[in-house]
Image (tube, rainbow, N blue to C red):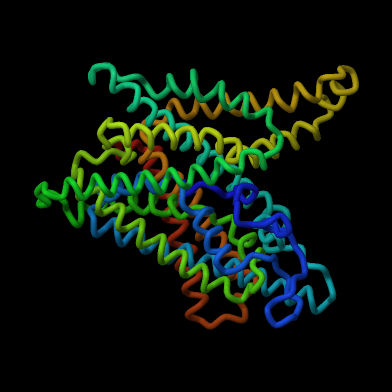
Amino acid sequence: MGEKAEEAVAVPLLGPSSPAGSPGRWRGPDGQATSGGGATWAQTLGNIVVSIVGTGVLGLPFAFRVAGWLAGSLGVAAAGLGNYYCMLLLVQCRHKLEEEEEEIDKPNQIQTYGDLGEKAFGSVGRYLTELLILVAQTGGSVAYLVFIGQNLSSVFSSTKTKDQPISPSVFIFLVLLPVEIVLSFIRSLASLAPFSAFADACNVLSMAIVMKEDFQLFNRPLKTRNAFNGALGLPFAAGVAVFCFEGFSMTLALERSMTERKKFHWVLCQAFLGISLAYICFGIFGYFAYGDETKDIITLNLPNNWSAIAVKVGLCIALAFTFPIMMHPIQEILEAKLKSSRWFHKACNRVQAAEWIGLHGIRILALVALAVLASFIPGFGAFISFVGSTLCALLSFVLPASFHLTFLGSSMALWQRMLDYCILLVGLVFALYGTYDAISGHSISS
């Protein structure tokens, strides 16, 4: 899942004086105070790319195989345009609330997606918004484990016969789980931040190597590369595309981090144009190169030479060290619930080390639960399509349209209200279909 909803702590371009989401009054180029951070447009552009691009991109060629290269391209373009527009809706909602609070001389309290949900629908809105973010973050964490397990399995199974591959679950439980348990004792996420940049570099390097391999295979006949593969493939590809653009909960933090916040829409447009074009090219080239043999993680199609193995192992190591960042919001909520319980307070009063044991124990239990869940995931592509078409669709389309109608509905033109209602309806239908598809067992596997 471009799956970095809470990774602001790891974004290297945000300076210490302007952490993502932190309020403050800054001087713009005209010398006037602005309620924003200190990030330039170039830094914000980099932060947007880092927040969105993740492991999901390596599943795009498989989505293009399922839907067809033209259908996949249209799906990526539609997902990019929809996410861009709905991100602007969130920014408009906050600006509207900021104007209202300035009129009554009240300090601005809208810093997170959850804050906006509470303003729109009260405590229920905050609970629903943060619950969706939490579950989506859990889905992204599971996708990390599945991705790493399958790639390590492909590397080390090359020494075995093809009829006896090593199960990804072996690597999840015997390699990843012990490493993540050790890393869970690290409370400072700043020490893990360099690995986030390393993971992004490995992602780019993986795409470059795949593209190189793709060009070398372009002498194969392309007659079997279909533009459309039927209507059932479209929702699958759309779910993967939405997952690849995930990072929606970072919208308000990224916009607030800019010195010149009025230019955010322009910077966001540049980022989405560039990312969408890169996604489409990568998906098309990967599908054209491998055709019906395209796997749900494109790196699994790479030959087991030294360069491909180095990229796979490097990417797995980097993701293993950034996994605690993915787990951070989950662990924060679990620890907060534990600290608020009466029995835990009583245990802490009776036993000196009870708090340390409890807080670290709940982290270990969460990791074990996610590892068990990841071991039951049948395929990376089907899983990220499900997460994208359900949780990410609700976060990216349904909630922004609902908030926009709540805060600005009465002042909008009829066509704007109709557009918001269409986005709301499409997002709900998309989420319902994704849920039905998963329950009915119709999900496509590699």
Q: How many discs appear?
A: 0
- Say left or right for 212 vs 260: left
Q: Residue 300 in the image: x percent, y percent? A: 30, 35
Q: Could you tell me which quadrant the C terminus lies in?
A: top left
Q: Residue 68 in the image: x percent, y percent? A: 23, 53
Q: Is residue 66 visible?
A: no
- Decide which of 168, 406 is in the foreground and name it: 168
Is the residue 376 above or below the residue 50 in the image?
Answer: above
Which residue corresponds to the image point at 61% horizontal and 81% vertical from the top-left? 411
Is the residue 150 above or below the residue 123 in the image?
Answer: above
- Say left or right for 84 vs 433: right
Is the residue 361 above or below the residue 308 in the image?
Answer: above
Residue reaching furthest to the right = 349
The quarter holding residue 399 reads bottom right
- Say left or right for 169 vs 357: left
Which residue corresponds to the image point at 70% horizontal and 68% vertical from the top-left? 36
Which residue corresponds to the image point at 62% horizontal and 79% vertical from the top-left? 410
The quarter holding residue 44 reads bottom right
Q: Residue 229 in the image: x percent, y percent? A: 20, 51
Q: Residue 379 in the image: x percent, y percent? A: 36, 34
Q: Is residue 419 visible?
A: yes
